[in-house]
Amino acid sequence: MRRKRLQFFLGATICLASAFPAKADDKAQPLPGTQPLTITEPLDEVMVAGISRYAVRALSESQKHRDEVWKLDAENAERVGKVMDDRRARFCAIIGAVDERVAAHDFEVVANVGGDGVVARVNGGAVTAYAARWQVLDGVHGEGLLLVPKTPPIARIIALPDADWTPEQFVGLAKGLGEHETIPAELALAGAEVLIPTLVSRDDTFSGNPAVAFTNQPHREFIYRQAFELGRHIIGYEVEKVLAAVDLCQKRNDEQKVKLPIGVAGVSEGGLVALYSAAIDPRIDAALVSGYFQERTNVWQEPIYRNVWSQLTEFGDAEIAGMIAPRTLVIEACAVPEVAGPPVVRSGRHGGAAPGAIKTCPIASVRAEFARASRHFADTQSAPKIAMIESGGGTGPSGSVGALTTFLKALNAKLDKLPKLDNLSRLRNAAAAGDRQRRQVQELTDFTQRLLRSSTKVRDAFWAKADRTSLANWEKSSEFYRNFVWEEMIGKLPEPTVPPNVRTRQIVDDAAFKGYEVVLDVYPDVIAAGILLLPKNMRADEKRPVVVCQHGLEGVPQDTLATTGEGYKYYKSFAVDLAKQGFIVYAPQNPYRGEDRFRVLQRQSNPLKLSLFSYIIRQHERTLEWLATLPNVDAKRIGFYGLSYGGKTAMRVPAILNKQYALSICSADFNDWIRKNSSVEDSYSYVYTGEYEMPEWNMGHIASYAELASLISPRPFMVERGHDDGVAPDEWVAAEFARVRRHYDKLGIGDGTDIEFFNGPHTIHGVGTYEFLRKHLR
């Protein structure tokens, strides 16, 4: 199917000419007032590749921006403390570490009836290992091992393994790691009390719901997919587990009337969590980050569960390190467990996990980012507090002598050399690692699903200041929400920086209309494109309304014109129908085409506080500006009508470009959007599909479809819904639309909104919607 559709697009001119003949001598003529369009490559491919280049370039330039911002802040000594507090608060927000932790009494020893919870003894009893757990959030616990030295501890350390290592492996009680990588045991033998949390793994065993489906998403991605839409993140959840442990370390210090230093250490994924935790919590005196520290320009090539909204606008690894200063940070360049991608799809499971790889950090990248971090430490007069240790030139094992010694000395350990691990005596098995992993995944799933169920109330509270007492008051008060949605949820690009340079070529000459392929420049490398249909029966001085007909996922503008085949199956040639009814029609090319090629755009853009719709909004804005200059276009009567992914566009673009679009029709997409993205209890959910670009940061607490429709108001808004559409059940659609209807009725403009249900599938129906267009655009 993919190959067939590409061939259709490559042969678009031929196919269209066959259905709507053009004269041979004027077929490629430009529209008067525009330049000839000479691009020969498929415009969707040109568009997606150009946006990718733009985003990658912006990622590279983001480092310079961060340098400038941090330098300015460092120069203002009086404000440094408050600036850093504000930074930490923003950092907590973007990683989703925002929930109130449960006040726990102490670490709980997990034991069988009559047992003491002892799992193993190290070096003949010098260290005892206990199975432990601790409370974190409501219904969420940390679990792992607690290593307690026989002598009074010199420090308290949280040691975080890589996501695919169990605590037992990290200590050396289970096979899987090299003999030199048992970091926690060595730290405990040096006199530290060491907690080893279980991280959510990259396995896919528990990624799903037995009542719905299972997927090949790593557990980390499975949690990420649910949480991102609700302003939470697997990273934030695991940082909260570390900080809850720090709470207990501090509590033990207070109760025992000691001031033992607190440290965190981690390898690979555990290194990420250790770095972030130390940056957030000043109670952590020292951090050891092994195998996770480098330039993050290519973070979009890493697994999706490392995707953090807006992170690189302010926080590269060096800047995160800067929040640790003047405390101690030890960076260890070393080998890590490499990951080529998600688990292979097994029988009985859905596929669709996002691509992404983990590789040992290139030593040049580690050194470059360390140099930047060192400057931040120098700004706080604490340059000696940051150190970099290269294990085997950056490819040796984690836990090198130099790294551990430097870290321990920062925690006031008085060592000539590290004690040697002689023997481990395993006394009993802790809870099966699989059961412990299942609990970790299930608790975070349950917590996130509770957030989903309460998200409507959170949105209602956020929108409480919107004034619906009159239409004028609504239009005034809604501007704050429109700007907030654009800047904080969608991501706002600057205004276009290049002239539009409009290029066109005629591709259709029908008895009723002419058709032109159109390309406009938006930014360097970024184009807008589409097909313009101009009815032939227009007088020179006549102004006509315009309908923008938007294709869906993997579509092209030609699909909206097709009178046969796959395009007609879904779009029913609605662009042609409307042109024959006398409307000027414009069918834009949107960039959601090319499967992973376009989905990666979301990954490249999110760290910059941008999304796919950041580009789409500016593309439409530029297109509308040009359409308004055409002699027969009435710029005050431009409506939007989109199917499927085009329906997603219908909810977002007219909500932002409220002054340019006179109405919007959402076909085959309108539903309870937050539930659609985050639910693990419904087969309709995107959690179970390959559309990993769908989650939008914290949308569940900002604006679902009812709120976006309210931003379209007072412009007319309509929903077109087939009873057999698999996007969502009718009940979801009707319930969400009821909120829209109430909003329009409260403003006294109830006749400005409508919904049409029809017997049919995921398709344009073109009955009530055509009447709606005639009513409101005529």
Image (cartoon, rainbow, N blue to C red):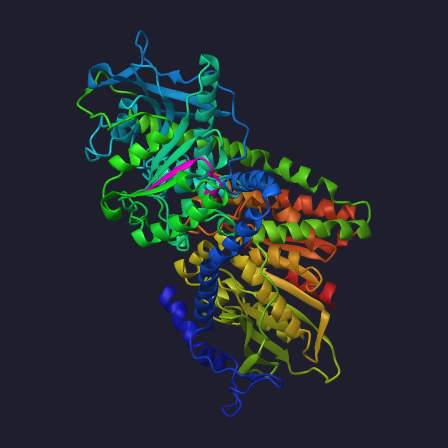
In screen coordinates, is 371 left or right of 582?
Answer: left
- Residue shown at the point (63%, 79%) measured from the top left: 534
Query: Measured from the top left, where is residue 537 in percent x and y?
Result: 68, 83
Task: Answer above or below: position of 150 versus 548.
Answer: above
Give 756 or 178, whichever is nearer the viewer.
178
Give 20 or 374, whichever is nearer the viewer.
374
Would residue 332 be counted in the magenta stretch? yes
Give 755 or 473, whichever is nearer the viewer.
473
In screen coordinates, is 610 left or right of 459?
Answer: left
Task: Answer above or below: position of 296 versus 288.
Answer: below
Give 170 or 407, whichever is nearer the viewer.
407
Query: Measured from the top left, where is residue 339 in percent x and y?
Result: 29, 46
The residue at the far top in this view is 114
Question: Can you say which quadrant of the picture contains the C terminus?
Answer: bottom right
In screen coordinates, is 7 left or right of 181?
Answer: right
In screen coordinates, is 2 left or right of 530?
Answer: left
Residue 368, visible in the rendered structure: yes
Query: Measured from the top left, where is residue 669 in percent x and y?
Result: 56, 53
- Residue shown at the point (50%, 62%) measured from the top left: 570
- Residue shown at the point (66%, 53%) measured from the top left: 483
The residue at the far bottom in this view is 25
Question: Can you say which quadrant of the picture contains the N terminus?
Answer: bottom left
Region in magenta: 322-333
Would residue 330 be counted in the magenta stretch? yes
Query: Measured from the top left, where is residue 256 in percent x and y?
Result: 44, 13
Task: Answer above or below: position of 485 versus 37.
Answer: above
> Residue 600 sits in which quadrant?
bottom left
